[in-house]
Image: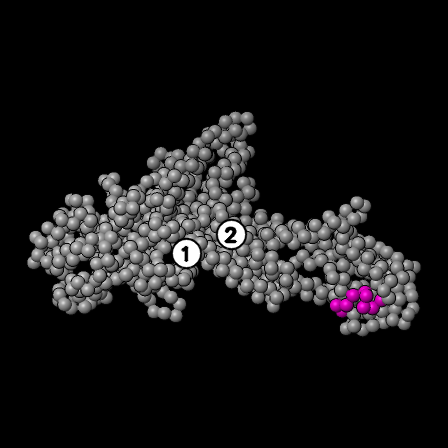
Amino acid sequence: MPSGNKRTVWTIWRKKLIQGNKVWATASGVAGCVILLRLTGILQVWEWTALDQFFCLRLIEPAETRVVVVGIDETDLQKVKRWPFPDTVMAQLLKKVQAHQPRAIGLDIYRDLPVEPGHAELLKVYRETPNLFGIEQMKDRDSAGIPPPPILGDRGQVGFNNLIFDADGKVRRGLLYWAVEDGTTHESLILKLSLTYLKAEGITPQPATSNPDYLQLGNAVFRRFAANDGAYVQADDGGYQILANLRGSANAIPTVSMADVLEDRVPPEMLRDRIVLIGSTAISLKDFFYTSYSYRLGQSPHPISGVELQAQFVSQVLSAVLDGRGLINVWAFPLEWLWILLWSWLGAKVVWKLRSPYKAVPVIVLAGIGLIGISYGAFLANWWIPLVPPSLGLAGSAIVIFALLAHLEEELKRSKEFLNSIINTIPDPIFVKDRQHRWIVLNQAYCKFLGRPLEDLLNRSDYDVFPPHEAEVFRRQDQQVFDSAQAHEHEEEFTDQDGTTYYIATKRSLHKDAAGNLFLVGVIRDITGRRQMEEELKRTAAELVRSNAELAKSATQLRHLANHDSLTGLPNRKLFEERLSQALEWAQENNQMIALLFLDLDGFKLINDTQGHDVGDLLLKAVARRLTGCLRSSDTVSRLGGDEFTVILPAIPGPQDSGRVAEKILTTLSRPFEIDGQAIFITTSIGISLFPQTGQDAETLVKEADNAMYQAKELGKNRYEFAHS
């Protein structure tokens, strides 16, 4: 391949790489921000809402045929005129149900205390019904617990009915096991009833082959819920939880009333060989809960009774084992992050490619609809994949690129105005072209040279004005400059509006404004003269670029000197106060904790006096390097003056974490320093103040940390102390 062609190919690839870097940089930045939002848990409520709507949109599944609910409704309450029902009524109901030979009976009603009359009769029923399971409520943070019926408890015929609620009050998880403080593992009513039914099918629980910590029933593996599964962030994953995959139909579980059973209006085959759950469905008893199906768009909230919810979970277990009905699966974090990055890249790429909001916005909307469709399709295949974070990444990247393009356009406009103001003062004909070889700026001398008004030339190309053979030459020479990024000067023939041909020398060069817009600037001169003016223009442009660079370099140096310690290079007191104020403002908005560490070197004055100030300065530099090296990049290490240092620890989980950082600093600084060929030992005393426990403002935090540091010195040095709140 000729060297010229190789150079052209490389130039094209380099342009694509530069454009790709902008897209990837934007996508990576936006994706990183979205991932951080995701990890804070801010997005989980939105993600739950999206999941709920997916559940509501799913096609209605066939009703469960293995589970039946005997509901105690308002009519039953009015007939008995008493709640809780007397034990004689409960005994009669259980006898009626057992007479139809169900596989298991779940009594989802607390009966830990006698309700006369009929308690003795009920106890007899308990003893004579081996497939009857009562309930208990396990003690948790919100309840002291409710014990089971004593006889059923002694016989092991009890399952707990505790539910897990998300922050929005909905039940999206079910419990299978619960381990208490004494090491005893309790089974839920859901699991008790399911295992009893499955035992008749020859299916017993066993460790999963893929993971021994997971429960396997038949071919179904019940993956244990983890704290960060799906949209959850640091959720309570105690016990053995599973994600709910309930049936959405109002008639998903067949239900009969207590009166129907007592008055023999229920066909025996409806209960025979099934799981029968008995519980309240009366609205007045307020045993109702919200699930993913409770809030359908455009409809009033529709809660589900507790006994129906238990039946739904039993149906989920049975259908997964016996019918192969899927359980909800989730992605691991790395795959989720890659998913967010992919959609962030797509948003940035679409806008960067199309440029125009009128073209890009519809495509972004279609992409968002496609994302919803993909997420819904994955949900139908029993995968809960992120929807809200990639949507934010898609929209966020698009917005950032729109803003970048607007900035580029504004800079282009300013550049045009600036160039106009400059080149119109120059008598030589001058033109400025964009990448599409269109004139975007022309001075009056160029218009006069061509014999055409400015309005006829702007945004047009050489082919619109010059003869084809001349236009082809100009295009080829322009492209050479674009491809090589080098200035070139060519001798050319030029034909004006009157048909007069001139021999001209055109100097072409590339210029880039602050926003990265690239321009081709051409200066036309008479071959016999004007060379001196061309050189002057070139020197002026170079001097302007050099002056701008020197000014920028000086400004950067001044900013650094104003905000950093001249000896150690660490942030000085001014920058420390700014960052502490910023950290406090962020912590207040996000309800986070901040730790401020105040350090003072022990015995530094003695080293300074005995070893000299040069050694002392070298020691301070070494201390600064060690402090910076042992902390997070998000932490701020500052030198206030002398041998006093501060450390800002933003977003710490608890006070003990700041203590661990202080221990790490003490250990790091206690190692000997090699200064001018000799080992120097030094320790430090640290005072710690916490926001918001110790103080609410920067001044108080600094003061309290300073006091705590002096307390550490008084207690023996080389230690840390917390400020008292």
**Distance from the alpha carbon under mark 2 to that under mark 1:** 17 Å
What amino acid is labelled 2 in the image? Trp
Q: Position of residue 3 (x, y in %)?
A: 80, 45
What amino acid is labelled 1 in the image? Gln
When asked about the image quadrant of residue 421, the answer is: bottom right
Q: Chief secondary structure of the magenta span?
A: loop
The residue located at (15%, 44%) in the rendering is: 154
Asked whether 721 or 616 is in front, the reply is 721
- Mark positioned earlier in the residue sequence (2 or 1): 1
- The vertical placement of 711 against 456, above or below, is above
Q: Is residue 12 magenta?
A: no
Residue located beneath label 1 in the image:
44
Region in magenta: 458-466
- Quarter holding the N terminus is top right
Q: Nearer the viewer, mark 2 or mark 1?
A: 2
When asked about the image quadrant of residue 683, the answer is: top left
In the displayed structure, does residue 290 sit left or right of residue 674?
left
Asked whether 708 or 524 is in front, the reply is 524
Residue located beneath label 2 in the image:
339
The residue located at (45%, 47%) in the rendering is: 332
The residue located at (19%, 55%) in the rendering is: 100
